[in-house]
Amino acid sequence: MLTDLIKIGFPKNCLSCSNALVKNENFICSSCYFYLPKGELAIGINTDSGKLFEKNDSFFGAGHLFDFDKEGKTQHLLHELKYNSNLPFGEYLGTLLGSEFHGLLSDIDFLVPVPLHPKKEYQRGFNQSQLLGKGISSVTSIPLSSNNLIRTRFTETQTKKNKEERKMNIQNAFEVRSPQEFENKSLLLLDDVITTGSTLMECMKVLSSIEGIQIKALLLAKAVY
Ligand SMILES: [Zn+2]
């Protein structure tokens, strides 16, 4: 009876445990959020995600919010974003990223979501990294740059590929339209998941030739590979 009344008053449920959300909770209840496995909440070249990057003079570190867990809770939430097209949830995850890493982003000039190929974005209807960027931007006021780094090559999904195949598959997939725009700027590359780091390394490859550029990366989750 009481639970029914609570459900009427608060019709929304946690995307992870399905319990009814209470006031001030959005999408994930505070208990689930607390227990979701997290990364170091730091941005550096020696963090778990930073270590996936090859040495590069323009690279200044990476950080991630969630670690994939054995029970698949993190995966379940990412699935909700990517395959159930829960766009407001994607933006909300961005605000979480923005809040947790706020103090570490004061030097960033542009948030740069890893682009999808236009054909892929059309098929999916959105770019999940772009949604994260919107959320981060709303919390930090750092501007989003979504059309300077572009994807010029349509690539197969990386899911079933090994590290070497991933690297080959993504090679020469990106271009920078106007390098001057990023000269002497500090960028924060954004993506939903880092697995082997091959996609982000490929972005770094085209960006790092730009004069005075500094690149960091922020990921929603790090997958175990
Ligand atoms: Zn929950």
Image: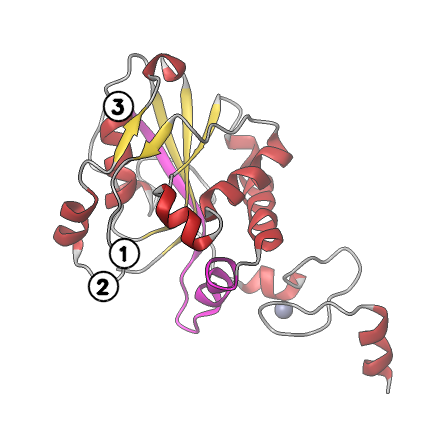
Q: Nearer the viewer, mark 1 or mark 2?
A: 1
Q: Position of residue 23 (x, y in %)?
A: 80, 59
Image-based side of 4 in relation to 75, left or right: right
User: Which one is earlier in the sequence, the residue at label 1 or at label 3?
Assistant: 1
| Residue where numbered disc 1 is placed | 157
The amino acid at mark 2 is: Lys
Give ligand 1's quarter of the image: bottom right
Q: Secondary structure at mark 3?
A: loop
Q: Which mark is residue 208?
A: 3
Q: Residue at x 45, y 31 (%)?
A: 146
Image vertical order of residue 146 relative to residue 160, above or below: above
The one nearer the camera, 186 or 67, is: 186
Q: Residues within 10 Å of mark 1 (few under 14, many from 20)?
A: few
**Amino acid of disc 3:** Ser
Residue ID at (47%, 44%):
41
Residue annotated with mark 2: 160
Give the extent of the magenta segment.
58-84
Q: Does residue 133 sit above or below 109 in this rendering?
A: below
User: Residue 171 appears in which quarter of the rendering?
Assistant: top left
Quadrant for the N terminus, please. bottom right
Q: Amino acid at mark 1?
A: Thr
Find residue 147 and report its image quarter: top left
Q: Residue at x 38, y 31 (%)?
A: 216
